[in-house]
Image (cartoon, rainbow, N blue to C red):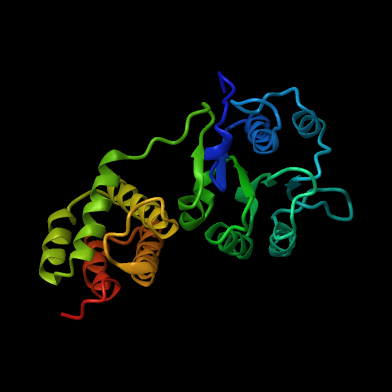
Amino acid sequence: MAQPEVYDAQRLSHAYIFTAQDPEEGLREALRLAAAAVCTGPEPVPCGSCRACRKVREGIHPDVMRIGRRADDKGRKKREIAVDQIRQLARDAVVLPNEAKRKVYLIEEADKMNLAAQNAALKLLEEPPPGVIFILCAENAQALLPTVRSRCVEIHGNGQRGAPDEVGLRLAREYVETVAGGSPSALLLWCAGHEGMDNRAAVSFVDSGMTLLADMLCGREADPGLGQAGLRRLLALLERCAGYLQVNVGVKHIFGLLAVGAVESSGNRG
């Protein structure tokens, strides 16, 4: 990361994913963010010199916790981060901080979480306790569930937040608004008009749709009229489509499912 990033303490997200080919590089920047979350110095943070920043640097801040793969009885790292580790994290996350205004949980090698652990983490990311920040370090963010990724700000190895695919995001917004419009014929026409895109573009569209719906559920984006239940049903539909795309189901079939399945999500039985 060429330039260390600084942060606005008042605008920190509740969850981040750091990806870097060099795990140590990603961990260093993740610890900078952890320090920013508890820093007591002047903005922009982290200041690097206050007591809290020094404690994070020395690995002794009581409100910055690191979670990783456990060691076996021979001292070797286990293959996965287990679900009981994430459940323990969830129990601890509701406890108030010791000395800072926030608590930070840094999950190293988050892409090593098994499926049960990722599902447990997803529940935390969907309904995070107040004043808690989750930082996931991953060499390969694609190994994380799309739903986990959609609830995090992604920062890549060059220190830049992942730039959204503008085309995918525009199409996702069009799709959600068409669903919210409540016209099955308009939805069918929209899906039929886009079913010719290639697999890569379809993946981007579906990923963008999941991110957009997650933002709507969290209030970061305006709900076009689906309501919380409708947004959740539509998100579940897109999650199914993301899974199908991973096993190479044809794009035309995906858009057929998006047309038929979304009618129920909109609450329109017409």
| Residue at figure coordinates x 79%, y 44% from the top left | 99
Residue at horizontal 82%, vertical 31%? Answer: 58
Q: Vertically, is 159 above or below 171?
A: above
Q: Residue furthest top?
A: 2
Residue most extreme to the bottom: 269
Quadrant containing the C terminus is: bottom left
Picture quadrant where residue 164 is located: top left
Q: How many marks?
A: 0
Lateral position of residue 247 relative to residue 57, left or right: left
Looking at the image, residue 131 lies above or below residue 184: above
- Left or right: where 188 falls relative to 257: left
**Residue at 35% across / 65% down in the picture?**
231
- Please identify the quadrant where the N terminus is shown: top right
Q: Position of residue 98 (x, y in %)?
A: 80, 48
Q: Position of residue 47 (x, y in %)?
A: 68, 24
- Residue 22 falls in which quadrant of the image? top right
- Where does residue 180 sit, x and y in percent of width and height? 23, 65
Residue in the foreground of this view, choosing between 160 and 177: 177
Left or right: 147, with 260 as reference point: right
The answer to which of 177 and 97 lies nearer the viewer is 97
Q: Quadrant of residue 54?
A: top right
Looking at the picture, tell me which residue is in the foreground, 41 or 87.
41
**Residue lying at 56% horizontally and 47% vertically, measured from the top left:** 15
